[in-house]
Amino acid sequence: MKQSVNLKNLYQVIQSSRLDEAVGIRIDHITGDDAFSFYGAEIRPNRKVGAHFHESGMEIYQIVEGQGTMHIGKPDENLEVEWQDSFSVRKGDCFTIDEGMAHQLDNDTDQPMILLVGCPKSHLSFNRVLVKGHS
């Protein structure tokens, strides 16, 4: 039985992607299913992804180009976040954000940040809780 391959180019996906206004990132589906997919994303220069968390499912980030700062923290029952850690990320870095952890990725440079994000499809729709961002 012949299997088909759905080949996509990360840069072409990003170029034609929509801006997710809720979190301020250009992002689009590359491959995968409802349980887990890869997305191509771009954070524009001197912009940040809106702070949020997911009640279920982890996210995996792979920085393809650029650099910035990732902030993580734990939200309480009132959705107030105690920001616990910030760390620099750059081209080649790969890391995981566990479910329930608030996160905000800042592109604090004058160059675009390109990344791959692995997560359930629900993270881009109903399984996303917006919180007050890291200052």
Image (spheres, rainbow, N blue to C red):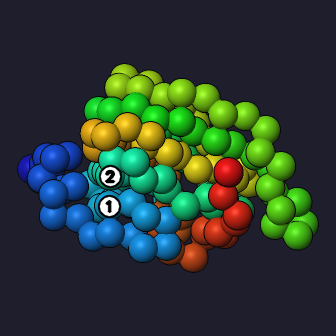
Along the horizontal axis of the image, is 122 left or right of 9? right
Report x, y in % for residue 84: 79, 38
Gap between marks 1 and 2 measured at Cα: 8 Å
Note whether 17 is above or below 84 in the view shown.
Answer: below
Residue 5 in view, yes or no = no
Note whether 101 is above or below 132 in the view shown.
Answer: above
Report x, y in % for residue 71: 64, 41
Dots 1 and 2: beta carbons under 8 Å? yes
Camera-side residue: 75 or 29?
Answer: 75
Camera-side residue: 11 or 109?
Answer: 109
Residue flagged by tag 1: what amino acid is it?
Arg
Q: Secondary structure at mark 2?
A: loop
Residue 20 in view, yes or no = yes
Along the horizontal axis of the image, is 6 left or right of 41? left
Residue flagged by tag 2: what amino acid is it?
Arg
Q: Which residue is mark 2?
A: 44
Q: Which residue is mark 1?
A: 26
Residue at x-position 67% and y-position 51%? 135
Residue at x-position 70% and y-position 65%? 131
Residue at x-position 61% and y-position 58%? 51
Along the horizontal axis of the image, is 75 left or right of 111? right
Whichever of labels 1 and 2 marks the residue nearer the N terminus, that label is: 1
Residue at x-position 39% and y-position 70%? 20
Closer to the eye: label 1 or 2: 2
